[in-house]
Each structure stands twice: as C-alpha cells, then as structure tokens.
Image (spheres, grey):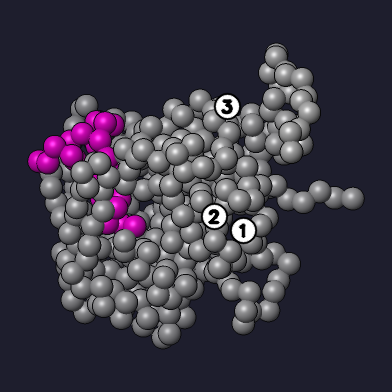
Amino acid sequence: MSQRLYTTVLIVPTGIGASIGGYAGDALPVARAIAQISDRLITHPNVLNGAQLYWSLPNVLYVEGYGLDQFAAGNWGLRPVHQNRVGLVLDQGIEPELRLRHLQVADAARATLGLSLTDYAVTDAPLGVELRQAASGATWGTIQQPDSLLRATEKLIKQARAEAIAIVARFPDDTGSEALQAYRHGQGVDPLAGAEAVISHLVVRTFRIPCAHAPALAPLPLDPELSPRSAAEELGYTFLPCVLVGLSRAPQFVQRIGYLAQASDLWADQVDALIIPSSACGGSAVLSLSQTAQIIAVHDNKTRMQSYSDALRVSALQVNSYLEALGVLVAHRAGISPAALHPKLDSIYRARF
C-alpha cells in the first residue's frame, strides 16, 4: 500500500523584518532544502521571489498570501497546472523608459524561458502607491486608485484569457531614507513588502486568480556595503523575472462547490506540517492549520512581531533553526517521534482523566 504524499507549508510573512526571508529571496535556500524532503511544498512569493534570481522547483506550489489563507481555512483548494497564460498589468505612473525595461523583461521571458504571456494592459490612471510603517516596524501601504487596477486586470482575464496576473506598480523612490539604507545593509524591514501584499491581495480576493507583484523603481546608486541578503534586488532594472516564472506554474484556486473535482486537487486537510518563524504565529493560515498539521516554530528567524504560539494557545514544536526544522520534517515524515531522538526519554505516565 502506498503512503499519502507528504505536504509541507513554509510561511515567512511579508514586511515584518524576518531575519531570513525578510530580504531579496533569502528564504529561497530554505525552500529548496524543504522541497528535497517533501513530496509537495506550498509557499508564497515572499519566499520564492528574488528579483532577477529564481529557482524552478517542480514540487513547489507558488501561492499568493491571501490565497494561502483561504486555502488554509479550507475555503479554496489548489489545482496544479502545467502552464498559465500570464497577463501583465503596468501602472500608468511608470515612466516610458522604465516601462520599456519591463516590457523587454516580458519578451525575454517568452523568448528565453518559453513562458506564455498575453498582451499587456496599462491602468487607466496612475495607481498612486503610498508606503506606511507601523509602530512595530512592520510595513504596509495603500493605493489611491484600486478600481483602475481592477479594471485593467478584468480586461486581461476576460478579453486576453489571462490565467494569472503579474502587476508592476510605480513605487515611490526614497533613496535617502533611513529605512531603505538599513534594509540595503541587511538590518531593517523591507519598506515595499507590505504595500506589495495589499496590491496582490486585492486582485486575488476579487478575481480568485494567481497574482504577484513587482515594484517599479529607479535604479539605486552603488553601495559597497550592500548586504548579500539584499543584493538580488540591485542586479538590474526590474524585479519582474521571478514573478513571471512563479506565476507561470502557480496553481489555480478552486472551490468544492461548482467545480468538477480532480485527483490532483489539494486541500488543507492534506497538509502535514507548517514551518513558521516562532514570533509570527498569529497569522490566519497558522491558526487554521494548527488544528490539523504539525506546526514547527523556528526561533532563529527573528521578526518584528511578538505573536508566539504559547500566548495564542497554538500547539507548536519549537526548534532553534531551519536546519533543525529539516530534521523534524524527516522524522515526522518517517512516523518517528522527535522525542525518541533525544538522549533522555521520560517514562510513560498513567493518564489522569
């Protein structure tokens, strides 16, 4: 008799200053390692996006954060695909030269990687991205013209038959800010990430379609003190390549009612384990999956949050590092209690009912 496929979820929340995964694709090595010991790994763009750097992993499902929350709650399922037709939405506020840079990236992805893209759309008004930072240090943001984004997206879905949406919005240039300098030196919070999440959440919530975002920014001046964790974002003119690669095979969202079920459909009750920074256990997906999956909380991945499993009454196995988490996953998949791998094993006690 064959065993069920082992399914892992890896989450590093966006815009909370995670020491691993809070920069430019620096959680990708963690995802690559976990993918080696999982049949299926579900994770989100913040983990896999590295600007012009990416790593295609055939058993990894690229799922936007809002969609991941809906999946974890059991509202949506994930249906793997061979390839999506990706529609590209460009903010009208992007300058002509910078727009051309992004269009050339899209053409390069078609010619070099064989990706399938529709014709692109430009919003009928500048989106007007605004950046915000909470007292905790976490980042978020807003857009002044959300309806313009939704109109452009709807046209690509209905008229160009887009199956996934890549968005490029013009973000404010703030080259002299302390937050940006700290981020470039591997010490701060990504000042863009929170606003990016707001943009993609809006599209996924409205159209139930895979979506990810790449900010358009003017190139930054060279910095000899640049952190390796931030360096991927400074290799060229755009952050779009990894988004197009991720969306090209992002699973589609399905619901139990109104869809003909397929054997490949994946639902929350099939998730075996979830790995999360130990101080970021308060997210919707974690709270939902804690009822059915093994939660593994990683202490070394510090964040600006203070949402620990004990305070939330979430049962989680605490580990120091992702290396230790990998060992826990191996034991869990093999059906071995982690307690059996410690030199001291307490005796079994009589239950008091």
User: Which circle marks residue 324 in the picture?
Assistant: 3
* Quadrant housing residue 244: bottom left
Three-letter amino acid code at disc 3? Glu
Identify the residue position indicated by label 2 in the image: 288
Residue found at x 49% / y 32%:
298
Three-letter amino acid code at disc 2? Ser
The percent position of residue 189, horizontal first and vertical second, equals 27, 40
Q: What is the crowding at mark 1: few (fewer than 14 residues within 10 Å), some, or many (at least 20)?
A: many
Can residue 94 be found in the magenta stretch? no
- Secondary structure of residue under mark 1: helix
Q: Nearer the viewer, mark 1 or mark 2?
A: 2
Would residue 163 appear left or right of 3 to someone viewing this image?
A: left
Would residue 73 appear left or right of 59 to someone viewing this image?
A: left
The percent position of residue 231, horizontal first and vertical second, equals 31, 36
Would residue 15 appear left or right of 280 to someone viewing this image?
A: left
For the residues labelled 3 and 2, the Cα–Cα distance comes to 24 Å
Q: What is the crowding at mark 3: few (fewer than 14 residues within 10 Å), some, or many (at least 20)?
A: few
- In this rendering, the answer to whether 220 lies above or below 248 is above
What residue occupies the far right of the structure in this picture? 1
Q: Nearer the viewer, mark 3 or mark 2?
A: 2
Identify the residue position indicated by label 1 in the image: 268
User: Which circle marks residue 149 in the picture?
Assistant: none
Q: What is the crowding at mark 2: few (fewer than 14 residues within 10 Å), some, or many (at least 20)?
A: some
For the residues labelled 3 and 1, the Cα–Cα distance comes to 25 Å
The range drawn in magenta is 176-197
Q: Earlier in the sequence, mark 3 or mark 1?
A: 1
Residue found at x 32% / y 70%:
89
